[in-house]
Amino acid sequence: MHNTIFLEKVNIDFEQNKIKSNISFSVTAKKPVCIIGKGLSGKSTILKSITGLVKISSGSIKINGVSISDKKKIKDIYDSIGMVFEKDALFDSMTVWENIMFKSLNLKSDEELINNSQIFLKKVGLNKKDAYLYPSELSGGMRKRVAIARAISHQPQFLLLDEPTAGLDPVKTNMIFDIVKKLNKEFEISILAISSDVQSALRYFDEFIVIDKYKVHWKGTANQLLKKPTSLINDLI
């Protein structure tokens, strides 16, 4: 059960419509998973259902064997999840180091927090001095990397990424995916990502889930995906 997310026959409430999705898949530390699909296919909604932001109408979502419906036990589990949002969601009024160490502000000295933030900045390919900048002073790629640094700052068991490379050029996109892959190996984090950049994701993820109309259209390995087994997948690649 360690570092495992398991969805079984999950159906999702969306805009008052109960959609019969019957979504089933699992994520482990050994196999980072990437969800792909056309726009408005339900990719982000699935991610939000795992974190409890979107209610499921039936089925089961378990994280490390604990059901998300178990409100008492799941709180501790949610504390072990790092989340990277599509629009990075950095706090503009805070410095980079304050953003990264947000969960620990006022619990430790500024000096210790700054030092800790710089450790995570290095892991995402940024410089120590970047800790003192504000989000408005960062490029789009730097903001994404700071968002990843914040997500891993409390050493989570799970890392969920919603379009982590949105709006980035191919070079920066590959940099972000490379960072994610290295973090998976270093920390043995279970990773579930959503990406619209299928070509880049194919170079970094081994397992793929194709979502269409809130249902699992297909799932398998990168090599299987490259064979374009369906017309929808052919359109995506």
Image: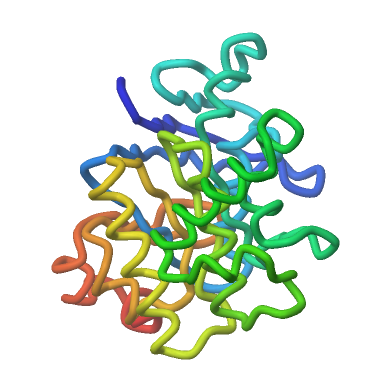
Q: Residue at x 36, y 69 (%)?
A: 177
Quarter assignment of residue 189: top left
In front here: 28 or 183?
183
Locate the N terminus by quadrant.
Answer: top left
Locate the C terminus by quadrant.
Answer: bottom left
Q: Residue at x 30, y 42 (%)?
A: 187
Tell me residue 216's x, y (percent). 42, 52
Tell me residue 138's x, y (percent). 66, 79
In the rendered view, would you say 220 is above or below 11?
below
Quarter assignment of residue 44: bottom right
In front here: 179 or 17?
179
In front here: 220 or 196?
196
In the rendered view, would you say 69 is above or below 49?
above
Residue 17 horizontal side relative to residue 70, left or right: right
Q: Residue at x 56, y 75 (%)?
A: 142
Tell me residue 2's x, y (percent). 31, 23
Q: Report the number of discs.
A: 0
